[in-house]
Amino acid sequence: YATNRVTTFLIEEIAKRHDIPLQKFVVRNDMGCGSTIGPALSSKAGVRTIDVGIPQWAMHSVRETCGTKDVYSSYQMIKAYFEEFPELDASFKVD
C-alpha cells in the first residue's frame, strides 16, 4: 500500500491533537492481499500518500458493514486533516 512512516506520523499526530481514535491494519509482506492504485500513483507523482478508510467488516461483500461511530470519526479525521495539514507539514523536515 502507499503509506509510509512520514504519512503515518502526519495522520497519527492530527488524530492525537483532536482525540480521534485510529484503527491500524497491517498486512505481512509474505501474505497475499488486495491492492490499491495508491502506490503506483504516489511513486509516479512524487506526492505523500496514505491509505485511510472507515473500519469495515466484510469489505466488498453483500454484508459490508461499518459502525455509525466509525463514520463520524472518519468525518472528524478528514475535517481535521484539511484544517491541520498545511501547518503540520510545514513544521517538520524530511530528509
Image (spheres, rainbow, N blue to C red):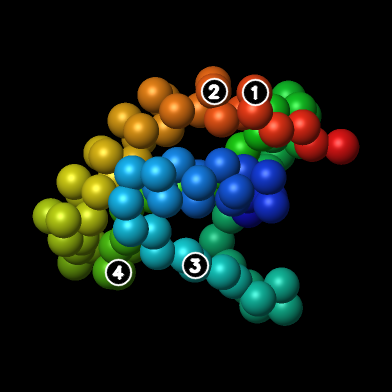
| For residue 77, above or below residue 30 | above
Marks 1 and 3 in Cβ contact (< 8 Å): no
* Left/right of residue 75 with respect to residue 27 in the rendered view: left
Q: Which mark is residue 25?
A: 3
* Gap between marks 4 and 3 measured at Cα: 14 Å
What amino acid is at disc 2? Glu
What amino acid is at disc 4? Ala
| Residue labelled with disc 4 | 58
- Give the SS element for disc 2: helix
Marks 1 and 2 in Cβ contact (< 8 Å): yes
- Give the SS element for disc 1: helix
Name the N-terminal-most of marks 1 and 4. Answer: 4
Q: Which mark is residue 87?
A: 2
Residue at image x 16%, y 61%? 67
| For residue 32, above or below residue 68 | below
For marks 4 and 3, give the one nearer the viewer.
Answer: 3
Quarter of image, res 45 = top right
Residue at image x 79%, y 36%? 94
* Gap between marks 1 and 3 measured at Cα: 27 Å
Q: Position of residue 70 (x, y in %)?
A: 23, 55
For marks 1 and 4, give the one nearer the viewer.
Answer: 1
Residue 33 visible in this rendered orientation of the protein = yes
Nearest the eye: 26 or 62 = 26
| Residue labelled with disc 1 | 90
Q: Position of residue 4 (x, y in %)?
A: 68, 50
Nearest the eye: 9 or 39 = 9
* Gap between marks 1 and 2 measured at Cα: 5 Å
Marks 4 and 3 in Cβ contact (< 8 Å): no
| For residue 71, above or below residue 89 | below
